[in-house]
Image (tube, rainbow, N blue to C red):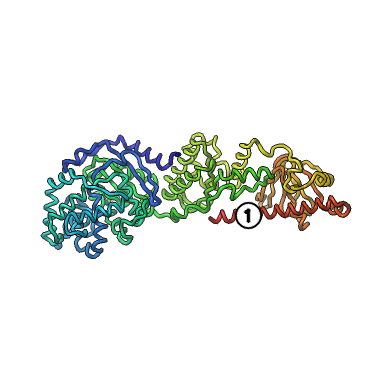
């Protein structure tokens, strides 16, 4: 399997921060001191279910305060918003996680992310006993994660035996009638919820589920009702990082929740869940490496939730097709056409649109990796792209590098005005001059180059002079008929740059191209012209005149030195009146021309369908 650019990015971030020192492992719960300070994992899961992880992403640890966000969602489902708000507020406290932040008149905790609010929240979860409450919570965790979870009994007993401050808080809540049930049983459920074992990957999946409107993006199971997802993310945004919450949302810009076990989970709605696990904590109880990594990723990819984009990831593709469905404007001979029909699936085109941000770049990369399993050449077109986020651009450049490392080729087209793309490519890809990455302005010329590469791999099919018998319009001709046709032909040669015919001239000849290449173009004014097609040896042009005998509708210009055999239609008509064999030649020519036009029409229909997908 080929390396993925986003995976490589996470690997580089992990390397950059693995040596970051600072912080201490939590010690106020004795069992937590057993954590290895060197443990360090990163995981990112998108709403499309793509999983990227690095380091100790599968090392188990206790969820601690991150459980508060999950329990708050459960309480909202079990009691409803009004009932929960009567017991727990949603205002930031600006204080430490274990502060006694209660409203003076009501005794209501300020929010569900501090310990006081979390204990009150647990009391609202359905279940009359700690066992019943835990069954309700464990069922929800299974929905979030797609697998059962368990409680670390040693940590649970350690928390229970040392949780005197939490007991004091709980009895204050009971005194204000915030907790109406048995206080010790509520505390027991609270201590157990904090002791649930998870991994960094699990936390990322929880975040991805919230990012995906409450639906697990891998299993498709709903873990939280859609109407409550914004409520949970709101309190994570304003209160999830305790007395660092304001600075976090200002810098990181994503709803997040930390735990003293060393985990942090961040959510970018509609895009992904990000988790980092590293036990050493700062003075506020947040993972030192976790904060640094989240800030780095948010900065690299412009992930602040208040940063707006004009388009969304699901609309990133204008169309996707391969070279069997849409071909270049170069007309090929019969054998070349046959070969390209067989090999064209190895050339794929992705036409993008809208603005490119992290999520859309990740989708482009995922689709590119899928296509590269069968394709050797990828053309990525930016013609319809607006702005490109710097982090997204780095991902795309990493994709190019990865593809070339695996013997694949990537071409960027439609970047005439994308100066940042060119500059970034030149800065990152040191061997850019050796690569065809930025060589072509449009998809058509890039397709033509890819087709030429395919044909060159078949031994240079079509090189040299193409005999008349190989021409598509001469299919089915007998030897006498070919001889009769050759008698009527005039052989001519043209130098590169010569006009074979011009727009508006009488259309009275059919040109069999024996050697060289010509282009069909139309004048666009201001000394500009537009290419309609390019015709190679073994093909013919001017066939429409045989049907309508009108005027030339375009210029035909020799791209190289050219040799042609030219059929004057008046000569064909005159000979046909005197010779049956010539009449047969005329009939077969008309038949083959009609077949050729029908084939072109079918190909045009296929291209229209492909470009609309």
Please tell me how crowded label 1 is: few (under 14), some (14-19), or many (20+) other residues with Cα within 10 Å.
some
> Which element carries disc 1, helix, strand or loop?
helix
> Percent x, y for residue 177?
13, 62
Residue 319 left/right relative to 448: left
As drawn, the residue found furthest toward the right would be 578
Residue 273 left/right relative to 102: right
Q: Is 344 located above or below residue 507 in the figure?
A: above
> Percent x, y for residue 333?
69, 44
Q: Nearer the viewer, residue 438 or 129?
A: 129
Q: Nearer the viewer, residue 526 or 51?
A: 51
Q: Is 535 located above or below residue 131 in the figure?
A: above
As drawn, the residue found furthest toward the bottom would be 82
Q: Which residue is mark 1?
A: 604
Is the N terminus in the top left, top right, bottom left or bottom right quadrant?
A: top left
Q: Residue at x 42, y 54 (%)?
A: 309
> Percent x, y for residue 312?
43, 55
What is the tally of numbered marks visible in this picture? Answer: 1
Q: Residue at x 65, y 46 (%)?
A: 330
Residue 479 seen: yes
Residue 239 seen: no
> Percent x, y for residue 168?
11, 53
Residue 231 left/right relative to 584: left
């Amino acid at each position: 399997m080929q390396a993925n650019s986003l995976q490589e990015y996470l690997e580089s971030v992990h390397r950059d921060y693995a040596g970051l020192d600072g912080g201490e492992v939590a010690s106020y719960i004795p069992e937590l001191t057993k954590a290895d300070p060197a443990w360090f994992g990163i995981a990112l899961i998108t709403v499309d279910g793509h999983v990227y992880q690095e380091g100790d992403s599968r090392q188990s640890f206790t969820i601690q305060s991150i459980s508060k966000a999950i329990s708050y969602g459960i309480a909202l489902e079990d009691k409803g918003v009004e009932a929960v708000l009567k017991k727990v507020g949603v205002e930031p406290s600006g204080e430490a996680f274990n502060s006694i932040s209660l409203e003076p008149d009501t005794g209501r905790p300020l929010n569900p992310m501090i310990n006081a609010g979390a204990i009150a929240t647990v009391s609202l979860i359905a279940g009359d006993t700690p066992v019943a409450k835990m069954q309700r919570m464990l069922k929800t965790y299974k929905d979030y994660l797609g697998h059962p979870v368990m409680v670390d009994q040693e940590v649970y007993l350690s928390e229970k035996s040392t949780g005197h401050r939490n007991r004091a808080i709980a009895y204050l809540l009971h005194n204000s009638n915030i907790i109406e049930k048995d206080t010790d049983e509520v505390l027991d459920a609270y201590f157990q919820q904090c002791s649930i074992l998870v991994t960094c990957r699990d936390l990322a999946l929880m975040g991805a589920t919230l990012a995906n409107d409450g639906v697990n993006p891998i299993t498709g199971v709903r873990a939280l009702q859609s109407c409550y997802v914004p409520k949970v993310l709101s309190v994570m945004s304003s209160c999830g990082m305790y007395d660092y919450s304001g600075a976090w949302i200002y810098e990181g810009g994503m709803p997040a929740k930390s735990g003293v076990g060393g985990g942090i989970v961040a959510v970018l709605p509609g895009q992904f869940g990000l988790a980092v696990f590293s036990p050493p904590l700062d003075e506020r109880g947040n993972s030192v490496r976790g904060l640094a990594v989240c800030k780095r990723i948010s900065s690299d990819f412009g992930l602040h939730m208040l940063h707006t984009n004009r388009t969304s990831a699901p609309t990133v593709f204008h169309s996707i097709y391969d070279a069997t469905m849409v071909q270049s404007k170069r007309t090929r001979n019969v054998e070349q056409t046959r070969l390209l029909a067989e090999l064209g699936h190895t050339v794929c085109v992705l036409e993008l649109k809208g603005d490119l941000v992290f999520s859309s770049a990740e989708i482009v990369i995922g689709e590119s990796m899928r296509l590269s399993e069968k394709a050797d050449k990828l053309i990525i077109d930016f013609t319809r792209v607006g702005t490109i986020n710097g982090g997204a651009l780095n991902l795309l450049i990493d994709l190019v590098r990865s593809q070339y490392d695996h013997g694949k080729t990537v071409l960027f087209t439609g970047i005439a005005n994308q100066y940042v793309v060119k500059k970034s490519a030149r800065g990152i890809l040191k061997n850019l001059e050796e690569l065809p990455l930025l060589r072509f302005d449009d998809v058509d010329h890039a397709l033509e180059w890819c087709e030429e590469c395919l044909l060159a791999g078949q031994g240079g099919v079509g090189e040299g002079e193409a005999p008349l018998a190989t021409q598509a319009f001469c299919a089915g001709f007998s030897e006498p008929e070919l001889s009769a046709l050759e008698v009527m032909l005039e052989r001519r040669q043209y130098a590169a740059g010569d006009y074979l015919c011009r727009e508006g001239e009488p259309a009275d000849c059919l040109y069999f191209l024996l050697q060289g290449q010509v282009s069909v173009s139309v004048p666009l004014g201001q000394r500009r012209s537009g290419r309609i097609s390019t015709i190679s040896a073994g093909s013919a042009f001017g066939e429409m005149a045989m049907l309508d005998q009108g005027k030339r509708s375009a210029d035909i210009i020799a791209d190289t030195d050219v040799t042609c055999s030219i059929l004057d239609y008046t000569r064909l008509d005159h000979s046909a009146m005197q010779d049956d064999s010539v009449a047969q030649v005329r009939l077969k020519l008309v038949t083959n021309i009609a077949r050729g036009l029908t084939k072109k029409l079918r190909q045009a229909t296929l291209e229209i369908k492909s470009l609309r997908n």
